[in-house]
Image: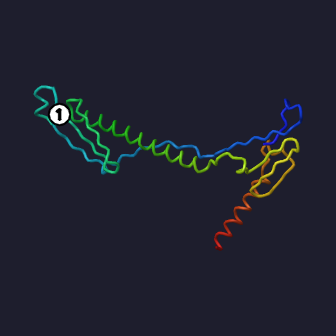
Amino acid sequence: MQRVPVTETSGRIHTSAASVAVLPEAEEVEVEIKPEDLRIDVFRSSGPGGQSVNTTDSAVRITHLPTNTVVTCQDEKSQLKNKNKAMKVLRARLLDKALAERSAQIAQTRKTMVGSGDRSEKIRTYNFPQSRVTDHRIGLTLYRLEDILAGEIDEFVEALKKKEQEERLQSSKA
């Protein structure tokens, strides 16, 4: 961006650079647990609890086979309650893992999209004193800065589409 600030008494042009990354909005991550992906083991609880600890298989261990995530629960006297509690913990762990993977994927995408922000990477110049906008990728210069800032960018979009089509055509011939 090239502009002359109102505070500039000598009329010198100030130049600024900015990097912008446009990413898709992150979707909600849904955790689907298929029954065939689970191995459920029951066993006797350990620790204090009286006679029932030694006689009933109330503890539950659930293994999610695709991720090898293991959850064990022996808090309750009932096997069903322990199983339900273990499933909640398993679902929470799988959701956490899925969210972490999604965040890592977004971070990687962002990293590849954002350059160094160096002025040598310039894509477009907005020159306020001359009311000029230049897209350096396609060599198009328009003297309608106010219109372009108001969103009238069809000319740039069409020229960029045309250049992309030409590049695809060239790469398919090679």
In the displayed structure, 68 sits above or below 171; it is above
Picture coordinates of residue 105, whole percent (x, y): 51, 48
Left or right side of 36 for 32: right
Amino acid under label 1?
Ser
Picture coordinates of residue 35, whole percent (x, y): 31, 48
Q: Which residue is drawn at 72% across and 50% down?
A: 120
Please indicate, yes or no, whether residue 146 appears anywhere in the rendered image.
no
Based on the displayed image, in which of its 4 quarters is residue 130 positioned?
top right
Picture coordinates of residue 11, whole percent (x, y): 89, 36
Q: Looking at this view, name the residue that lies furthest to the front.
A: 10
Image quadrant where one finds the C terminus: bottom right
In the displayed structure, 122 sits above or below 76; it is below
Based on the displayed image, in which of its 4 quarters is residue 79 positioned?
top left
Picture coordinates of residue 150, whole percent (x, y): 80, 42
Name the image colouring: rainbow
Judging by the rendered image, the residue that carries numbered circle 1 is 45
Left or right side of 62 for 24: right
Q: Residue at x 30, y 34 (%)?
A: 85
Within 10 Å of the Cα at label 1, are there few (<14), some (14-19), or many (20+) other Cα atoms? many
In the displayed structure, 38 sits above or below 162; it is above
Q: Which residue is drawn at 77% across and 44% down?
A: 151
The secondary structure type at the circle numbered 1 is loop
Q: Which residue is drawn at 24% across and 35% down?
A: 80
Please indicate, yes or no, whether residue 104 appears anywhere in the rendered image.
yes
Taking depth in this image into account, of 91 and 81 the one nearest to the observer is 91
Taking depth in this image into account, of 10 and 4 the one nearest to the observer is 10
Left or right side of 68 for 45: left
Left or right side of 170 for 67: left
